Image: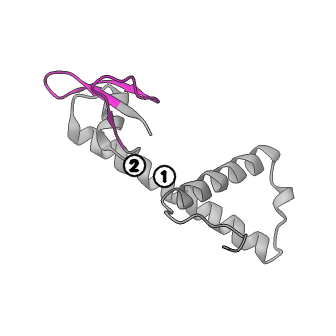
Amino acid sequence: MPYIQRNEKGEIIALTADSTGQDDQPVGLDNPEILQFLAGNDNPAKGDHYFEMLAQDLQQIRILEDLIDLLTSKGIIMFSELPVAAQQKILNKKSIRESLDHAGDILVRDEAPLL
């Protein structure tokens, strides 16, 4: 989770991957302020527009991944027919998505029976 540091005016002045121990705040990757900061944009409305565009791109990418899953499950294409770089990206995204899906679990899934 990224961390932000703000100045006295409340504006983001730094974005770090790890906490620096100062007055940094953890923020979600979907925070529009991050995109605005990275774009170096002083206009919040424009930053919100960029954020919405990126969110739409992510939705379209997910649709393509689901389509690839559907085509491979029906035997129309084989996953191994995709370029190696595409295979790696798809597998990496699936792995990240699965780890994030389970990150909020409070119960540990253990195959061993309780005594």
Looking at the image, which is closer to me, 2 or 83? 2
Q: Are marks 1 and 2 in contact (CB under 8 Å)?
A: yes
Looking at the image, which is closer to me, 104 or 71? 104
Q: CA distance from mark 1 to mark 2?
A: 6 Å
Query: Which residue is pictured at 31% across the width and 29% down the height?
Result: 24
Furthest residue in direction front, as rendered: 115
Query: Which residue is pictured at 35% across the width and 50% down the height?
Result: 52
Magenta highlight range: 4-27
Which residue type does callout 1 highlight? Answer: Asp
Looking at the image, which is closer to me, 28 or 58? 28
Left or right, 114 with respect to 100, comes to right
Residue position marked by numbered label 1 in the rendering: 57
Residue 36, position as x, y percentages in the image? 31, 34
On residue 53, which mark appears?
A: 2
Query: Which residue is pictured at 42% across the width and 35% down the height?
Result: 2
- Position of residue 13 relative to residue 85, above or below, is above
Residue 71, position as x, y percentages in the image? 74, 71
- Element at label 2: helix
Residue 29, position as x, y percentages in the image? 41, 44
- Say whether residue 19 is magenta: yes
Furthest residue in direction bottom, as rendered: 74
